[in-house]
Amino acid sequence: MSIVENLQQVQNELPENVTLVAVSKTKPAEAIQELYDAGQIEFGENKVQELVSKYEFLPKDIKWHLIGHLQKNKVKYITEFVYLIHSVDNLDLLKEINKQAAKCSRIIPCLLQIKIAEEDSKFGMYAELAEEIISNYKSDYPNVEIVGLMGMSTFTEDENQIRSEFKYLKSVFDKLRTQNSELKTLSMGMSGDFKIAIEEGSTMVRVGSSIFGERNYH
Ligand SMILES: *Cc1c(COP(=O)(O)O)cnc(C)c1O
């Protein structure tokens, strides 16, 4: 199947209220252009340098999502154009995004990444910190807007574990939403687990290999 057919197949499995971010990391600009020509305009990258070079090369109305771990010193390279940052996992990073966003007179939409997996390798903050940040950030950081939460489940075959991690994230999302109506986006679900994520209340899935094929890192 072609990548356009893969895209259509994934899209057919998504309810109308769920946004698809096509994760194009490691894939060439030509592949992104092909999907763009087929109507996909939201793409996700996890590395700043790769995101910037693709941004420069590709149509300017693409909505670029930064989904990977973001280092403070790299924020400035993406603030002018990034559409949504999924991976805010500490307050210092939010401060830096606010500072750089102010320089280009933007209010940048962000998701707080919550740690839901049991592996140490997955980034994210605890729900308690997210709650504290969300209830306090507005006056100090007017150039960021926290619009939701993101989480990555444990890499496991155990569907029950994945489901319970997503359930937990949804419960945190619902709780925080009662305090802040601007929280609209719950980014959870990747190629291997987006169907479970949707059943558990995801509003945004980040799908790479099911569309573009497996990635070769080596
Ligand atoms: C790579 C990546 C994805 C997509 O993974 P696939 O399994 O290829 O769908 C989603 N989210 C994040 C944060 C990623 O780094």
Image (spheres, grey):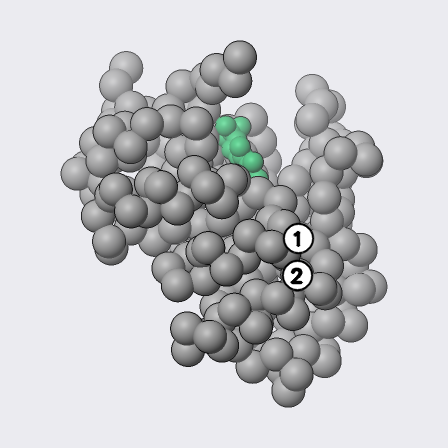
Residue found at x 63% / y 50%: 71
User: Which residue was labeled with disc 2?
Assistant: 93
Q: Nearer the viewer, residue 53 or 111?
A: 53
- Can you give x and y, in whole percent of width and height, for residue 201 in the image? 57, 50
Mark 2: amino acid: Leu
Residue 136 seen by the camera? yes
- Can you give x and y, in whole percent of width and height, for residue 1 in the image? 28, 15
Number of numbered discs visible in the structure rendering:
2
Label 1 – label 2 distance at C-alpha: 12 Å
Residue found at x 66% / y 53%: 113
How crowded pointer 2 is (Cα within 10 Å; few <14, some 14-19, many 20+) is rated as: some
| Mark 1 secondary-structure assignment | strand
| Mark 2 secondary-structure assignment | helix
On residue 204, the disc is: none
Quarter of the figure with residue 210: top left
Pointer 1 residue Cβ closer than 8 Å to ligand 1:
no
